[in-house]
Amino acid sequence: MSRYIESFLEYLLINKAVSKNTYDAYKRDLIQFEEFLKRPIVEADTSNIISFLSQIDNKRSLNRKLSAINSFFDFAYKREIVDEKFNIKQAKIPKTLPKFLSKEEILRSVEHINYKDSSWFELRDKALILFLYATGLRISEALNVKLSDIEDGWVKVTMAKGEKQRVVPIADVALRAINEYLHKRPCGSEYVFVNKNCNKLSRISAFHITKKYLNVSPHTLRHSFATSLVLGGADLRIVQELLGHSSLNTTQIYTHIQKENLKDSVLQYHPLKDL
């Protein structure tokens, strides 16, 4: 890895306060591009970038790598490391509805877990699933929640992207599940969700939990939270605030769900539906 990439990554951490996932992805993509070049990244030109990206079939992966490259050259240009910055347009990705689960599917997956007959591991799993669905938190945010962050039915969230904070209400059913789990948990920790050694639960463990009970990733529960609110009639700006999206554009994907719901309502209730 060249010193130019190192400087850029340091800038991302200190000046932009990006999440660990973003940092790791940009680092991986830029190193991959530099290895493709077989020379320092600052010596690349447009044809090199296009040649590199032409090997990638998946549009999402392509756009992520392109974002990393564009961001790097914007950084390098502003610091006069290069004479030219590249701004290659991203590939258009068809808008698809995010996968989500219904309330019934989620509740059914944990209905067999109860305080009397279940282990504290099972109670933890149930609490985590209901907490993710009830709050819409990113999994990295949920795993960083401490006992002191939950108060009077609200959770204070330190956002994964930057140092900003927000507060999100927690449904009573999720609060009860958390309290039952904590009451039976045999060890103490400042974090709500822990492993058998009472250390903070890892992302991979959380993934295994949601995969085991629902056959989805934790992020699907975040989509399910947002979808439930939109279908229930919530204003998109409120959903944006609860999800912690910095821009309403990121939340716009859920308008497709709203439109489908309106269409279904018209087809079901309009007097011309049977003609």
Image: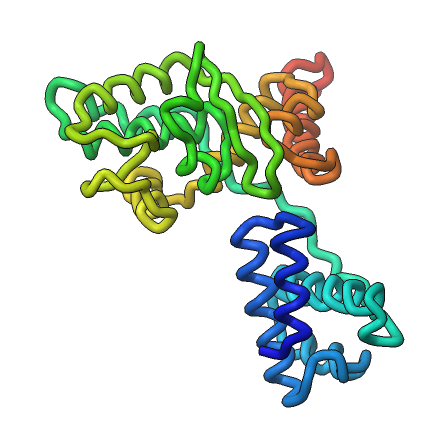
Is 99 displayed left or right of 83 in the figure? left
Q: Could you say where residue 206 lies in the image, as x and y percent from the top left? A: 34, 43
Q: Could you say where residue 229 lies in the image, as x and y percent from the top left? A: 58, 22
Q: Quadrant of residue 28?
A: bottom right
Check the image and name the residue furthest to the top. 152
Is 204 displayed left or right of 42 in the figure? left
Is 26 displayed left or right of 272 in the figure? left
Q: How is the image coloured?
A: rainbow
Q: Quadrant of residue 132?
A: top left
Question: What residue appears at the point 46 percent right and 42 percent down from the top-left corner?
Answer: 140
Question: What residue appears at the point 14 percent right and 26 percent down from the top-left corner?
Answer: 118
Can residue 267 be seen in this snapshot? no
Question: What residue appears at the point 20 percent right and 34 percent down from the top-left corner?
Answer: 121
Q: Establish if 107 lies above or below 16.
A: above
Is 158 displayed left or right of 125 in the figure? right
Q: Quadrant of residue 55?
A: bottom right
Check the image and name the residue furthest to the left. 117
Q: Establish if 238 lies above or below 95.
A: above
Check the image and name the residue furthest to the bottom. 38
Q: Could you say where residue 173 lies in the image, as x and y percent from the top left? A: 36, 15
Q: Could you say where residue 204 lies in the image, as x and y percent from the top left? A: 35, 51
- Which is nearer the eye, 22 or 63? 22
The number of discs equals 0
Q: Establish if 80 lies above or below 148.
A: below
Image quadrant where one finds the C terminus: top right
Image quadrant where one finds the N terminus: bottom right
- Which is nearer the eye, 237 or 151? 151
Can residue 244 be seen in this snapshot? yes
Question: What residue appears at the point 64 percent right and 89 percent down from the top-left corner?
Answer: 38
